[in-house]
Image (cartoon, grey):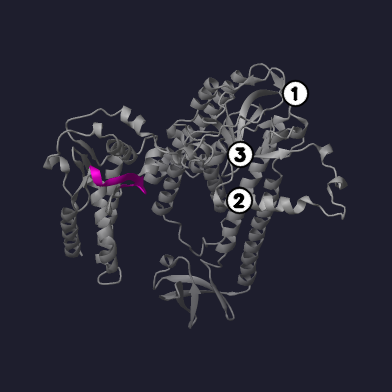
Amino acid sequence: MSRPDPACGHNARVSRPPVPLSAEHIPPGTADWRTPDAQRWLTAVPARWAHPLWGLMALVASLVWDVVAVPAAPCTSTDPCGTDWLGLGIAVVLVLTLYWVWRQPRFALAGLAAGLVGFAVEGGFAAAFGEPSALLFLVAAALTAAGLVHRLAVAGRQRSLALEAAGPAAHPLPAAARTFRRGRLSFVLAALLLAVAGFGYWQAQQVADAYEERAAGATHLSGRVTALEQDDGVDILKVEADGRTHRFETAFPEDFPVDSRVDIVVDGDWAALVAEPYDAFGWELLVLGGSVAGLASLVNGVDGLTRAKRLRRGPLPVLRVLVREGHDDGRTWVFAADDPEGLRPILHFHSLYAFDDEDEEDDDGDEEDDDEDGSDAGDDSEAVVELGRIAEILRGEDPAPPLREAVLYGVPYAGAEVAFVSRDDADDPEVSVECSVTAVKPAVPGLVERGPQRRKRKSPRRSVDEIAVGMTPTTDPRVWTAHGFSRAVGLGLLLVQGGGIWAALDEGPSWSWLWLVVGLPWLVTAVATALTWRITADRDGLWVTGAWRVRRVPWDVITSVRHSDDGIRVGRAKDSSVDLSPTGWAWLERRLGREPRAERVVEEVRALLLRPELRPLEEASAGQQGMPVGPPLVALSVLWGVAVLLLL
């Protein structure tokens, strides 16, 4: 059985060879990047603990805890709540640092250093051991910094391995790549976004200046808070001063308890709290968003421009590779020169074509292609072809882009810029030059699978013969039970169930009780299945233990065994299928580098179905058949509900 092409959705192997690159476009001394060297390069990737997600989660958790645990300073007449540009600037740095942790390790280290300096200035190091939130921030910053340093060190190791594979040969970039410009779009976006932030700052200052100007000529009074009301969700403060009652909107009603004294300024019908003189939060939010997005775009543009200039600075190492454009997202995938099937990608990036300046000439057209009446005979046919291609793309039936021989210019490592020369079509003798517009990334499993790795998940399962090799005939029945991931899913759903019962009963009789009638039965079924599902294969068939009962399915009535939607389905002739769901979390199991247990169970059961000689020779005992836990779980849920009612 042939293996599928991993970079496309077709089931048959693509037999056409890679599009060749003529010898005159391959610089002398160019080395092939072969699979052994490529695999060494791929093994030099960051460890799982250094994934930016963990640092991000730790930093966000520490910042959220600090906001919740440390109360904000109250608004007072001596220290009113106005615009806090210093605090806003610190917030911009923190948000940018979170973004850079994912995208720009070097800038993230600078952002962390700035954050720690600010932390030290506020006396945070001295108070860290007495303040859990401050201590958590230090631990999160240390964990994140360690991961960033590790990622940079690994990139240096990849650079060394790529230089070793390329050898001593070095050649300048093709002319088209030397005129390629990077970062212009980022600079345009940065200018627009920073202009938006500047507009927000100007508007906020207008609000503050207008208040200061009017308050300077207003009457200053001291009043007493008489009541706190709500009007359409807005907190309204009633203050009695000089025989009149004034109403003020407040964002912090807890700072002004009833019967407390507050200072106000009055100018005719206009009045304001001295502690909360104006509300410029919307403009400040605009400044924050515009500054973060604008500075991020600016840094991306400067970084891309700097890397592109470094790429054009002098002769570069060259490697002979194979490339293919991604079938889904247009990424350029790079394969080893001795991988003609494109089975094991090495790295990927987005790229754009580069053109020589002298080639950008006006084309007056070729009249030889026109009919005698002056019309273009090929327009209609080309339009039909293009419409057909669009229809194929929408249906997912368009052919996958071919593999192409290419020469890679530059040193590939995580975060690098590269360029390559290749031919787009075997029928076109012209070569094209493409330059990367995103940083190089190793083709290793990540949180979201892309390209060939993701395509492999959709390929046909292993053949029955391949599965049968690892299975030997046995006398005793074969038993498959819920594993760790499945039980973890069950425990998580059990917590949701218990919390839902508490929340519904805590509110008293209401529409939320409808959840107990509609959602609770499904939840109990899912919890019981995830915790204790079991399939037992014996001489005569399968025993399938679900949430409520144990079902007997003889071998001669089974038509199919499938894994879908994190469940197992056993199809039966002239009867409904037997379903078990959920049986784990296949997505998370793959992310952690493990084969989903339920998929393995399905493959082995299918092998027993199609290879009778592998089936057990004895019948399963009652203990081996399993016991459903749905009824006991219902009793447990009822007891929990009674306990909640008694505690309320």
Observer-nearest of 477 and 585: 477
| Identity of the residue drawn at 30% across and 71% down | 511
Q: Which label's residue is closer to the chain start, 3 or 1?
A: 1
Task: Give residue 554's quadrant in the image.
Answer: top left
Pointer 2 local density, CA inside 10 Å: few below 14, some 14–19, many at least 20: many
Q: Judge whether residue 564 is colored magenta.
A: yes
- Mark on residue 24? 1
Q: Which label's residue is closer to the chain start, 3 or 2?
A: 2
Alpha carbon separation for disc pair 3 and 2: 35 Å
Q: Which residues are magenta?
A: 555-569
User: What residue is pinned by disc 3?
Assistant: 401
From the viewer's perspective, tell me whether residue 276 is left or right of residue 572. Answer: right
Quick one: quadrant of the C terminus? bottom left
User: Disc 3 or disc 2, which is closer to the eye?
Assistant: 3
Mark 2–mark 1 contact, CB under 8 Å? no
Residue 487 position in % (x across, y down): 27, 44
User: Disc 2 or disc 1, which is closer to the eye?
Assistant: 1
Residue 405 to residue 364: above or below: above
Quick one: quadrant of the N terminus? top left
Which element type, helix, strand or loop, lies under badge 1?
helix
User: What residue is pinned by disc 2?
Assistant: 293
Alpha carbon separation for disc pair 2 and 1: 45 Å
Task: Give residue 428's quadrant in the image.
Answer: top right
Observer-nearest of 512 and 403: 403
